[in-house]
Image: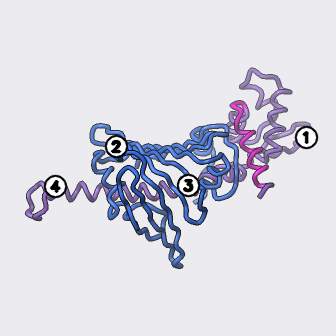
Amino acid sequence: MATAQAELDQVFGALADPTRRAILTRLTEGDASVAQLTAPFTVSQPAISRHLKVLERAGLISRSRKATVRLSHLEAEPLREATAWLADYREYWEESYERLDALLAALQESNRTDTNGSSTGRSTS
Amino acid sequence: MSELKVTAEQGVPQVLTEREFDAPRELVYRAFTEPELLAQWLGPHGYTMKVDRYDLRDGGTWRYTHTDQEGNEYAFHGVFHGEPSPEGMVQTFEFEGAPGHVSMDTLMLEDHDGSTIVRTNTVFQSVEARDAMVEGGMAVGMSEGYEQLDELLNTSLKPRH
């Protein structure tokens, strides 16, 4: 449990930085070299390399070598795990609120029927 | 379908939610406060919900039980604080499986021309307690709003379903 916690802390730490999130978004289009990843930013290549190290340590990317170029590759699984911690809470409320939607619609429908004078004998308050 | 927003900031023992409903506020308030209506929608999927008591007044107590398909019961109770009204209600919340671990919920219903925005504000005793409750044991630091993360996930990754 402590390990999983530490891993998630690293993931969230890595995601906290806008440049690193932009790098991840870029990698959704496909693997890229450091030079390619640096191009859209005003920061230096060494700075991008440091960001890549953080992302790699968090398991969010993997890196491979192709000839002399190091390619970065997006790893989706830690991202899914990182968002899973709130899933139970969210799921609880999402499911409940979907049932509430249906209930409210049914209550409004029965209100309409009542006020249309279909003689159900119940007054709407 | 309206989307549920959940906000849990790093280092703050609080969770905020927001959700819009296509119904007038009075009706939404009834669904939250009339036990027979509440029992029809609140709770996890596959559980039956029974409201044992719901004394809706300042100082009144409430208790409800979720029962799973194997018959395991999970009971919760708390106290209403202040006079509950469609503008809002404040109550404590305690899982009977973890006595003494209490959170405070503020429910706010906002009237928007026939639709209603439901906001909840839940304050826990500590960040650890919040994380234990929302996740079930794994404490996680969260520095960014979930929307950004959702955005990233939605633009890049197909959810596993």
Label pair 4/1, CB-CB below 8 angstroms: no
Distance CA(mark 1)–CA(mark 2): 59 Å
Which badge, 1 or 3, comes first in the chain's sequence?
1
The residue indicated by pointer 4 is: A124
The residue indicated by pointer 2 is: B116
Question: What color does chain A have in the rendering?
Answer: purple
**Closer to the camera in the image, B158 or A91:** A91
Which x, y percent locates residue A50? Answer: 84, 32
Query: Is residue B110 something one can see in this rendering?
Result: yes
Query: Is residue B159 something one can see in this rendering?
Result: no
The residue indicated by pointer 1 is: A67
Which x, y percent locates residue B68? Answer: 51, 73
Question: What color does chain B have in the rendering?
Answer: blue
- Disc 3 marks a residue whose amino acid type is Tyr
Chain bearing tag 2 is B
Distance CA(mark 4)–CA(mark 1): 77 Å
Q: Secondary structure at mark 2?
A: strand
Q: Are marks 1 and 2 on the same chain?
A: no
Q: Are marks 4 and 1 on the same chain?
A: yes
Mark number displayed over residue A89 = 3
Q: Residue at x 71, y 33 (%)?
A: A17
Distance CA(mark 1)–CA(mark 3): 47 Å
Distance CA(mark 3)–CA(mark 2): 22 Å
